[in-house]
Amino acid sequence: MPVTFRPAEEKDIALLLKFIRALAEYEHMLDQVVADEKTLADWLFDKRVAEAFFAMEGETEVGFALYFHNFSTFLGRGGIYLEDLFVLPEHRGKGYGKAILTHLAQIARGRGCGRLEWACLDWNKPSIDFYLSLGAKPMNEWTVYRVSGDALTQLAGEDAKEQTTHWEELS
């Protein structure tokens, strides 16, 4: 059966959270998922900072991708960052992962984006081999840094509440 795609809608929040938790379980990070339906609805459908779609086998959602735009100053144009791609275990090996990436590449090209990028856990050899087979290149000379939680609050300093309020007024 050929794969089809449908964009995630606000009514899909519970399903998106189910896919996110399934991905987190696969990555041995389920204890780190703090997202809930209200937060996802706010950020995906009210603030619209990210987009998602489902890969469909008939009428059944078998995989999903969640992505957002980034920007390359070197290219002078936007790109797409794939935050999550997940295919349910019972549907793997049927070409859905490649179809999802192909669909996302088509979205990127259709929007004039200069690149599509994502991160992969170092231990996930099956995914790494798959990505390499598609022509993806690892960015070995780069290290990803992250500030979150208490470190983010501390870095933001005492003016964090004032800045957050100002940002909300601008949005």
Image (spheres, rainbow, N blue to C red):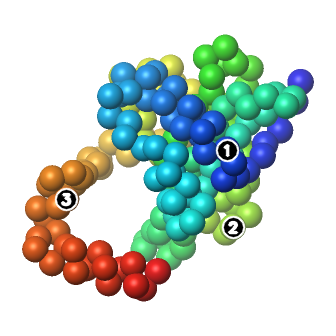
Nearest the viewer among 134 and 53 is 53
The mark closer to the camera, 1 or 3, is 1
Q: Which mark is residue 88?
A: none
Picture layout, residue 121 above or below residue 103: above
Q: Are marks 1 and 3 in contact (CB under 8 Å)?
A: no
The quarter holding residue 17 reads top right
The quarter holding residue 169 reads bottom left
39 relative position to 64: left or right: left
Picture layout, residue 1 above or below residue 71: above
Spatial CA span between label 3 and label 2? 32 Å
Question: Callout 3: 10 Å neighbours few (<14), some, many (20+)?
Answer: few
Residue 112 percent coordinates (x, y): 67, 69
Three-letter residue code for mark 1: Asp
Three-letter residue code for mark 2: Arg
Mark 3 lies on residue: 152
Picture layout, residue 58 above or below residue 6: above
Picture layout, residue 57 above or below residue 171: above
Question: Callout 1: 10 Å neighbours few (<14), some, many (20+)?
Answer: some
SS label for mark 3: helix
Residue 15 percent coordinates (x, y): 63, 36
Q: Which mark is residue 111?
A: 2
The mark closer to the camera, 3 or 2, is 3
Residue under the image location 11 percent in, 62 percent down: 154
Q: Earlier in the sequence, mark 1 or mark 3?
A: 1
Three-letter residue code for mark 3: Leu
82 relative position to 90: left or right: left
Q: Which mark is residue 12?
A: 1
